[in-house]
Amino acid sequence: MRESLSTSRGAAPTRRDVAKGSGKDRAEPVTADDLDMISGGVWSRPGFLVRRLHQIHYAMFFEECEEGGITPVQFGVLTVLARNPWLDQTAIGYEVGLDRTTAADVIKRLEEKGYLERRINPEDKRSRQAAVTEKGAAIMAELQESMARAQKRLLQPLSPRDQKLFMSLLVELVEANNQYGRAALRSL
Amino acid sequence: MRESLSTSRGAAPTRRDVAKGSGKDRAEPVTADDLDMISGGVWSRPGFLVRRLHQIHYAMFFEECEEGGITPVQFGVLTVLARNPWLDQTAIGYEVGLDRTTAADVIKRLEEKGYLERRINPEDKRSRQAAVTEKGAAIMAELQESMARAQKRLLQPLSPRDQKLFMSLLVELVEANNQYGRAALRSL
């Protein structure tokens, strides 16, 4: 079900099978051929593919959980807190993959929705902790199935065996690199 | 090199091996145990892991390409255009995984930097096309190695064989789901 241009992956850099439109009236623009680089195109780059798969998951999550008014990251924060009540905000951010500012922001939004309560850490006044409320637990219960469906759909194209394989490689990669990258990901 | 809390993956939902701080003076908050759900935690969710790996790639890309002042998405747009000169904006967005508005925005930024030139499609006044300039080609050439290093580092924790396997599963998943998810990914 490949839908991208035939040149977008796998093609040798010398191929140019996309019509160049009517560029003839202008100076010929620089192409990969001229540079002898960008050999595989974006589809040869794990970073590109991982970003696309991330986008695909977001789209599926919102399709499945539309009525919930909650994002995958918010669901992740609720999940971590349901398992670790009164975790402090820094640790929540670490667990879910958010920098300090973004974690505080997401937690505040969840509190405004009534899904979390926050308090000052009784043992350290500088630290803030959070826990899931009854209302938060209810929305999690309500959305649990839809969320699981979104996860399932993401891997559906693979055989059950390959799904397991993919998950184990994914876990290995994230574990090994877990110290990296908790920024807000907003740069385009 | 796992650095997350021991409860953050794999643990049975009944385990509670994170200290609950001093929550005893408040009503006991709702936990996963009470709900009998969220069984595997975030680490059992492909969507979570893919998002983390995406973040990790961004961090590595910016570490490697810091001096370039360019984002992975911008590099992707340049790559697609170097291979497909005078592609129109809608197709660029499709190839790189951007909705129409975001694609226009990214292309505008690249034009402002002098890396792209734009024109109106001579065959369709409503469509805008872009191509890489000499300056754009130069920045690509300059950053090519750093970009490749970021890609390589992302998969480095796996054996060469597993890297190939992971890439092929990733391609399979993105191809099969390629119609999904070209939104801006800004929701947290």
Image (spheres, coloured by chain):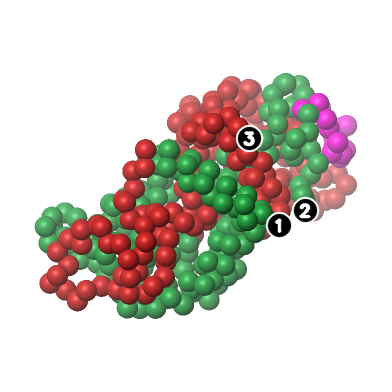
Chain colours: A green, B red
Q: Are marks 1 and 2 in contact (CB under 8 Å)?
A: yes
Does dot 2 land on a helix, a strand or a loop?
A: loop
Does dot 3 land on a helix, a strand or a loop?
A: helix
Q: CA distance from mark 1 to mark 2?
A: 9 Å
Disc 2 residue type? Met
Vertical position of residue B130 compared to residue B172: above or below = above
Disc 3 residue type? Lys
Tell me the quadrant of the picture where the C terminus of chain B can be found.
Answer: bottom left
Please say whether residue A17 is one of the residues in the magenta stretch: yes
Disc 1 residue type? Gln
Q: Is residue B154 rendered to the left or right of residue B139? A: left
Q: Dot 1 surroundings within 10 Å: few (below 14), some, or many (20 or more)?
A: some
Q: Nearer the viewer, mark 1 or mark 2?
A: 2
Main SS of the magenta segment? loop
Q: Earlier in the sequence, mark 3 or mark 1?
A: 3
Q: Position of residue B116 (x, y in %)?
A: 68, 35
**Chain on which label 3 sits:** B
Q: Are marks 3 and 1 in contact (CB under 8 Å)?
A: no
| Tag 1 residue | B179
| Tag 3 residue | B164
Q: Residue at x 84, y 39 (%)?
A: A18
Q: Residue at x 47, y 42 (%)?
A: A172
